[in-house]
Image: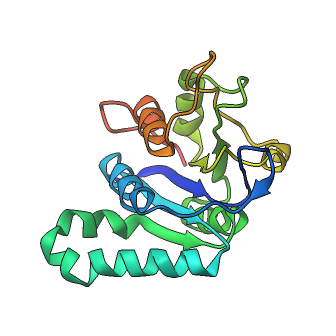
Amino acid sequence: MLQPMSLALVHYPVLDRRGDVVTSAVTNLDIHDLARLVTTYGLSRYYLVTPAVEQQTLVSRITAHWRDGAGATYNPDRCRALDALQVMDSLDEALADWQQLAGPNGLPILSGARHQKGLEYPAARELAAVQPLMLVLGTGHGLADNLYEHGWPQLAALRSGHYNHLSVRTAAAIMLDRLVGESGQIAKFSG
């Protein structure tokens, strides 16, 4: 059963180590590791957000190998996981697609280690039980500050303290486990 939840991995607008807004590079690992994570937890979509045409072309080449090329025969499970993947130019485009799929109440929920305030996971699970969520993660050094100005809910940082710089794949896995849990289901959705 698909969850009323999706995941968006944003490559623009994100921050670099100096705090400048940049477009980060897509990595091969993020493409299929997050697709496998989304499929494992039964999410409806995995949005990979980048406006860079060269990066979109790279994603197409990699996914074609696993969907249609030698990789499809070699590892059919990876091919299946990539079915959830949608490449989008912008987060707005991903949100519009999500709202078409999940309904107009589809809501982004932002993540980020730099922002200590936000919903704790029990409250986020309650929100997910009544509203289809798009979990939004940033690459580089996190989502650009302007994304937090929309008033969208955000999750509290996974950990507070002196060091909090997990890979996006690790953070996504922890977040989805906390949101969806071992049962593999968000509390009953009343769409």
Q: Residue at x 64, y 31 (%)?
A: 113
Image-based side of 180 in relation to 127, left or right: left
Depth check, front residue: 147 or 60: 60
Quadrant hosting residue 2: bottom left
| Spot occupied by residue 28 in the image (x, y as percentages of width and height) | 41, 63
- Given residues 52 and 41, the one toward you in this image is 52
- Give the answer, above or below, for where 99 lies relative to 111: below
Q: Residue at x 37, y 75 (%)?
A: 63
Q: Is residue 75 above or below residue 181?
A: below
Where is residue 10 shown, x and y percent of the image? 62, 57
**Residue 138, x across and y down, in percent:** 63, 49
142 lies left or right of 82 = right
In the displayed structure, 32 sits above or below 148; it is: below
Residue 29, given in percent of the width and then of the height, sits at 39, 57
Q: Toward which corner of the image does residue 95 lie, by quadrant?
A: bottom right
For the point 65% across and 75% down, which residue is it? 52
